[in-house]
Structures are given as C-alpha cells and as structure tokens.
Amino acid sequence: MSKNERHIFIGVLLVLAAALAVMLLQDTLAGRPQEIRRVAVLLDGADESYWQSFRLGVDKAAREHNVDVRYVFRYDGPAGEAQAQQLRREWEGELDGVVLVPVDGAALAEALKEAPAGLAVTVVGPALPGAEGTCTIAASPEEMGRQLAGAVADSGAAACTVVLTGQEGETALRRYQGLEEGLRDRDVVWKAVTVSQTDALPEPDGQPVVALEPGMTEALCALGGPVYGVGTSNGILRGLEEGTVAALVIQSDYDAGYLSLLSVLETLEGRRPEDQTLDCYTVTAENMFTDPMDQILFPVA
C-alpha cells in the first residue's frame, strides 16, 4: 500500500469512527429520561373561565419544554393571605418554579422572603414590592385604564359610572388611576360607585358603566349596556357580540401564559429573564373577528 493510500485509508477510518461516536451519543441521549420541571401556577381566585386563554399559553410552553404544571384556582379564607400560604405549601413540595397572578402583592412579597434559594418566580402583573429576582410579565395597568377612558370618550358620552367592589387588587387600582387620567384629559365626568354584592349593582341609565376587573365586567353584562371593561371569558365575549359590552381593553392572555412559563425556565437555566410589558388592545363588536383580535380572543392550543 502506498503512502497516499495509507493516508486515505486512515482518513476513512477516522470519519467512520467519528460517525459511530455520534450515533452512540445520540442513542445514549435518546435513552436518557428527560428532566421534568415542576411548576405551580397560582391564579388570583377568579373564575377559571377568565384564565382559559392564559392556560392555553402555559400548556403550550409546558408541552414544548417538558414541564409538569399544577394550577391553583381557589383558596380557603381571605384570598390574599390564603394565596401566600398556598405559595409556601407549593415550595415545600419541592417544585422548581412558580407563576404568580397576585391577589395581594405585599403578602406574596413577604412570603417570598422565606422561599428556598433557587425557586424561580414569575409574576403576571405589577412587580411585587421589595421582591428581588422576580420577573414580571403583563400589560401596563395604567395604559389599559387610559384606553378604557378613550373608548368611553370616543362613544360621545359626557359622563360615566365606574363600578368598584372596594376589594380591588393593585392591578385594578392602577387601571383606575389610568382611567381617571384618561377621563380627565378627555373632559368626561365620572362617578365611582362601590358595591359589595351583585344585587347592589347600579341600574343602567343609558350612560356607560366601567368595570376594572373581569368579574365585574361580566356581572354588569347581565344588566344591559353599555359596559366598558376588561376580560375575555365566554360570557364577556358573548356580551360584546350581542352589544351589551361596548368595548373591552385586553392583553393577549395566551402570550402572558406562554411567556411566563418560559421566563421561569430561563431562570432555572441560570439566565436572568427580562421583564416584559405586553401590548394592550381595544376590542369592539366591529373588530373582534378581524386580525389580530380574533387570534388574541380565540387562540388555538
């Protein structure tokens, strides 16, 4: 065998050996069980239908990245305190991360001071006070309020009624701040009415009524319109289609769910995910079935 032939022969052997090594590595990795991450999603205690699109987004990310997701919808006792207690129970169960939709941001921030090192936390909503190392994902509550005000003003109304419960969380209160700013800028007069029970809701008088949370939006739909609110449950969207809801201001809950789980995984991989402010949109009966509103309101799993 000549010198050149030997070189060619050795080169072929090296290529075959490299190919064999790659095949063996692939077989080894294929046979190794994938690590399953465990993540809890603690929602705000509202009806499950208000979070249907959010869950679709979380579940899509979970399928793509091999995550075992546990949802908590309901809490026993005062919701803010009970959610904080549930958070403690979750991390005692040795989960990897948690997505929080806060009822009481201050209570959750206090609970997180005791959280084990390495717990990945993402908040869907405003940042928790004093809670370092948490990622936040949500539309600006103030901007949502300003868009609600714009929708009321664009209807030609000179006045409106804002219906409150007296138990609004930080997100709803910040929406109210934006709403007040927007109504003031557009010279729309408003009055705030606080109710504690559904049967105490104000009777419709033809003027716009404004809700800052999905539950109140849906409750006002039952009285007739025009209602300006937030939320994308089936009942609320039915009201929009039928005309009792004049306009909704929404974010993409699907995106919020998908991105919130991804941010938890980024933290677990040792990276620092960035806070994300989602766009918000004004939806009416006229544009609810047009692009991109149809994709936001009716996402496909």
Image (cartoon, grey):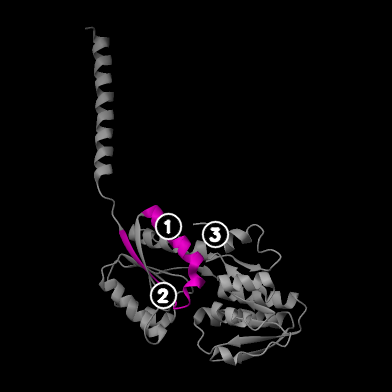
Local crowd size for mark 3, using a 10 Å CA cut-off: few (<14), some (14–19), many (≥20): some
Horizontal side of 145 relative to 68 (left or right) equals: right
Above or below residue 163? Residue 3 is: above
Is disc 2 placed on a helix, strand or loop?
loop
Q: Is residue 68 visible?
A: yes
Q: Quadrant of residue 264?
A: bottom left
Local crowd size for mark 2, using a 10 Å CA cut-off: few (<14), some (14–19), many (≥20): some
Magenta portion: prevailing SS class: helix
Percent of width and height locating residue 247: 67, 73
Magenta part of the protein: which range?
Answer: 37-65
Badge 3 amino acid: Pro
Horizontal side of 196 relative to 95 (left or right) equals: right
Q: Does the CB distance between marks 1 and 2 fall below 8 Å?
A: no
Tell me the number on the disc at residue 299.
3
Tell me the number on the disc at residue 61.
1
Badge 2 amino acid: Phe
How far, Cα to Cα, is label 3 from label 2? Answer: 21 Å
